Image (cartoon, rainbow, N blue to C red):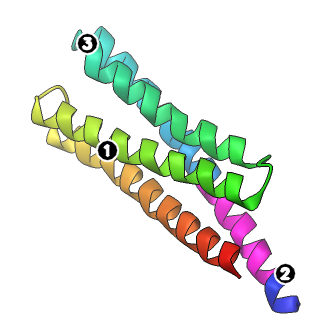
Amino acid sequence: MENFKLKIEMERVRENIVMNKSYAFALRVINLYKYLTSEKKEFVLSKQLLRSGTAIGALIKESEHAQSKADFISKMNIALKEANETAYWLHLLKDSDFISEKEFESIYSDSEELLKLLVSIVKSSKKNLKK
């Protein structure tokens, strides 16, 4: 029983970390969106980035009040899909020269970190659901 409680507490800590990191990432995405629209006059790709990049944290926040473990996994899995989509838009912005390699690497590393955290949460939650 004690081991189970420890696992639950560790999962909560990891969820708080991913929530904080997704919020900070959303702020970076918003700032990048402002830069792209005002300085580069790019409105299509940046809007897609804004939508997917801010949806990650919103879905993680929404998962706090999931109706069940399955609902929690579903919301986290959708957040994972949004994080993956965000990585796609970042690559496209770099490869189309709207952002530099340096700008890309800076924000993409945060994107990759979120992806890894979400993959880990989804995998461990699915494993725990089967128990």
Task: Give the percent coordinates (x, y) of residue 36.
Answer: 29, 18
In the depicted structure, whether residue 106 falls above or below residue 95: below
Residue 13 in magenta?
yes
- Rendered image: mark on residue 125: none
- In-image side of 122 versus 5 (left or right): left
- Picture residue at 76% right of the left edge, 49% below the top: 66
**Label 3 CA crowd tier, 10 Å (few <14, some 14–19, many 20+):** few
Tell me the SS state at disc 3.
loop
Task: Give the percent coordinates (x, y) of residue 73.
Answer: 63, 57
> Upstream in the sequence, badge 2 or badge 1?
2
What's the magenta region? 5-18
Tell me the SS state at disc 1.
helix
Tell me the SS state at disc 2.
helix
> Upstream in the sequence, badge 1 or badge 3?
3
- Picture residue at 59% right of the left edge, 55% below the top: 18
Rounded to the nearest whole Å, what is the CA distance between mark 1 and mark 3? 22 Å
- Rendered image: mark on residue 5: 2
Dot 2 and dot 3 residues touching (CB under 8 Å): no
Residue 10 in magenta?
yes
- Rendered image: mark on residue 39: 3
